Amino acid sequence: MRFSKRKTTRHFNPSLFSALQFLGFVIGIGVLLSIPIGSSAAFFLWALEEVTHMRMAHFNLIFGLPFAGLGMGYLYHRWGKQANLGNSVIRSSLVDAQTPIPMRMGPMVLGSTLVAHLFGASVGREGTALQMAAAMVRPITRSFNFTDKQYRIALTAAIAGGFGAVFGTPWAGLVFALEWNRKQPFCWEAIVTACITALLSDTVCTAWGISHGTFPTLQIPKFTVAYIGWMLVSGVLFGLLARSFVLLQLGVRKVATTCIPLPPLRLFWGGVLFVITVSLLHTDRYLGLGLPVIEEAFLKTLSWEDAFWKLVLTALLLGVGFKGGEVTPFFFIGATMGSALTQVFPYPPGLWAAVGWVAVFAGATHTPVACIIMAAELFGPEVLPGAAIACAVAYSVSGKKSVYAE
């Protein structure tokens, strides 16, 4: 009797292959982006701390700010081109993948921000982190012949990584990138890739020895009707504060552009006005990031003047064209105003400083969900219900315009 060999056919599983392709893509993008993004964020934060120490040791450096602004303005006016558009060109590239993000944008914004902080400019750091991260995407995607969709996924992931690494809040970075890119429909590829990139970028940044600081333990009251009412009222106040900043910055930009057509001169005269104002105030509380004042807001009741002057001075410098960002000044404005509210509101200053920190940010950037997540990451999950109420209300009363207006 002959036995015939039965031919066994191995069936190909297309769904398994697609899943493996997807997994390889998101992990590959996460690794390719997170190492340079996390490392550049670590260098930026280290360099920022060094120039801040130098500025604090030599207060007279502030008198060089107009000339530093003149030099930076000429640099961007002469060679910046698309890089001069900053975050706007990133958002345009998210919509139209053919919109180029020049590689020069990364080193130019890094150098300009460090120079601005060296001379005491009241600007932030998130804009620098986002632009540095975004400038790295095009060279990587070109090497692998990415499609337009894959490029937008990678760019969204880079935004999440840059934000998460610079603030030590990867989950907020993920949500911020998705809210920032709300003109495009969400897709699982973008969400997963941004998640991996944000987590890995923060890990890489921390591995370089960078610490994002800690906050004192907050005293969270019971979740009562009165507590909800106070959060609703505070949300309205923080939203109006955010709206005031946006309108003032846009107003400064419009007046400066009309009266001083040449960009380098706008930065020069804006710097002159900043120096005169700070000299008349006889204080250095509003220079640079203002992290010591933010820490102070969590411990005791401050004056509303801190929030007012930080708002005015930051809107002035960003309105005339200084580089850096707005987010850390929002933290300053929100935390100090929250601390000042304890002159009238119940509950400890630390609670209101934390709520103000995220609520002003939510109103000014129109990214409320990211701000709610940030509250939980920075201050603990206990603050989440109150912060969610304040952020939602602040966003709703802040108006249609944000600091990221096109």
Image: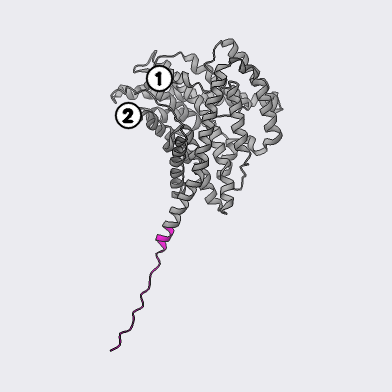
> Comparing marks 1 and 2, which lies closer to the viewer?
1
For image coordinates 37% across by 24% down, the residue present is 231
Percent coordinates x, y for residue 331 in the rendering: 47, 25
Q: Residues within 10 Å of mark 2 (few under 14, many from 20)?
A: some
Does the magenta portion include 13?
A: yes
Percent coordinates x, y for residue 329 in the rendering: 51, 24
Does the magenta portion include 214?
A: no
As displayed, is residue 55 above or below residue 35? above
Q: Nearer the viewer, residue 313 or 104?
A: 104
Q: Is residue 120 visible?
A: yes
Q: Secondary structure at mark 2?
A: helix
Single out the residue that lies furthest toward the bottom: 1
Q: Is residue 401 visible?
A: no
- Report the residue marked by disc 2: 382
Q: Main secondary structure of the magenta part?
A: loop
Instruction: Please state, as top left, top right, bottom left or bottom right, where the N terminus lies in the image.
Output: bottom left
- Report the residue marked by disc 1: 298
Percent coordinates x, y for residue 391 in the rendering: 42, 29
Q: Amino acid at mark 2?
A: Glu
Q: Tell me which numbered mark, 1 or 2, is placed earlier along the sequence.
A: 1
As displayed, is residue 19 above or below residue 278? below
| Marker disc for residue 379 | none
For image coordinates 56% across by 24% down, the residue present is 51
Q: Amino acid at mark 1?
A: Phe
Left or right of residue 154, residue 254 in this image:
right
